Amino acid sequence: MRVFVTGGTGLLGNTILRQLSGAGHDLIALVRGEPDSQVFDGIHTQFAHGDLQDKTAVENAVADCDAVIHSAGMIHLGWKRLDDSMAVNRDGTQTIVDACLHHDCKLVHVGTVNTLGIADRNGVANEDTPLDHAGGQIPCSYVLSKRAGNEVVLQGVKNGLKAVLVHPGFMLGPWDWKPSSGRMLLEVSKAWRPLAPSGGNSTCDSRDVAAATIRAAEKLLANEIPSGRQYILAGHNMRYLELWKAMTEAMGARQPIMRAGPAQRWIAGVAGDVVGKLLPHEVDFNSAAVGMSSQYHYYDSSRAQSELDYKIRPFEESLTDAANWICQHHLGN
């Protein structure tokens, strides 16, 4: 199949390109500038030059494709930059949807579990969990804009688009060039952090998520799954304290001691918000990010395991491979 992939410099998008290329598929990747030879080394693909606001570039790229995998997105876990986030995650998705409708092209849209309902500490959420369960997601720029992108796709489905949505958990793996989730590995290795966030997440491997995303495209083309179907691609549900201890061990760093308590979380959030108001940019430890890391983002991937043959490899394998790759490509940079 011929596939147009967005977000090819990101962790998931780059992994998707590598798997598609390795399987001999015909590819075209969206890039904003001159492609980085290191990032695309070993990937056999054409390039479409432009961004998600460049409707002509996207239309031309989609025109002769069988499927689009839209993995590009803007991640800002804070209260600011909502307009920027909407421009990418909502309006950019609209560009993709319009092109797919125009050329009768199938679409796999990469969302995030952060747009779905959440669990409490003793449960797990799935695709049908109400959005307001356990207090709901923190309505930061990332969550709001990615939900808006989902709605664009679902409206497209109502208009005749053949599309499915996949929602990855917290991904670890090689080829994290920017880095994205690999930033957490870098941060815990640079300085001792005695307190870990109080919540938890669902950690998965970007290679497993990529394989299931490609499988979704194949099944959509074969009319084996219904348009509008949504799939959680998550993994190992664990508290951040457990995750950070494993990360620091993998990076050869000092482990955290305990989870942050309510007072410590409040102080960190308020301090981050105050600093963010004094600076032209919002700092990472703002109250939105602190709030998100205090929730339990535990998810059940049974639907994807059943319908997309989604595999979840051992956590230790994902962490080891991610840590080794980060140390080789980023540590000290």
Image (cartoon, rainbow, N blue to C red):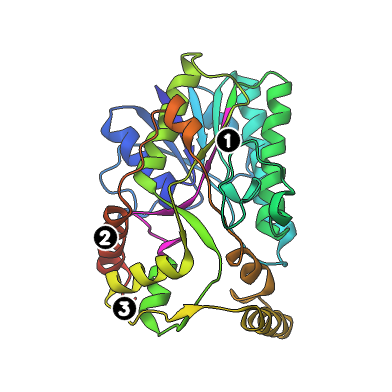
User: Which numbered marker is on residue 320?
Assistant: 2
Label count reads 3
Q: Earlier in the sequence, mark 3 or mark 2?
A: 2
Q: Earlier in the sequence, mark 1 or mark 2?
A: 1
SS assignment at label 2: helix
Amino acid of disc 2: Thr
Q: Real-space Cα distance between discs 3 and 2?
A: 18 Å
Q: Is residue 286 left or right of residue 26?
A: right
SS assignment at label 1: helix
Residue 130: where, in percent of width, then height?
71, 42
- Taking depth in this image into account, of 150 and 29 the one nearest to the observer is 150
SS assignment at label 3: loop
User: Which numbered marker is on residue 332?
Assistant: 3
User: Which numbered marker is on residue 58?
Assistant: 1
Q: What's the magenta region?
A: 164-182
**Of circles 3 and 2, which is in front?**
2
Residue 287: where, in percent of width, then height?
68, 73
Crowding near the residue tagged with mark 2, few <14, some 14–19, many ≥20 C-alpha atoms within 10 Å: some
The answer to whether mark 1 and mark 3 are in CB contact below 8 A is no
Residue 50: where, in percent of width, then height?
55, 45
Using the image, determine if residue 317 lies above or below residue 94.
Answer: below
Q: Earlier in the sequence, mark 1 or mark 3?
A: 1
- Please indicate, yes or no, whether residue 256 appears anywhere in the rendered image: yes
- Please indicate, yes or no, whether residue 91 appears anywhere in the rendered image: no
Per the image, is 177 magenta? yes
Crowding near the residue tagged with mark 3, few <14, some 14–19, many ≥20 C-alpha atoms within 10 Å: few
User: Residue, x 70% and y 64% (percent of image)?
Assistant: 81
Residue 89: where, in percent of width, then height?
65, 48
Amino acid of disc 1: Val
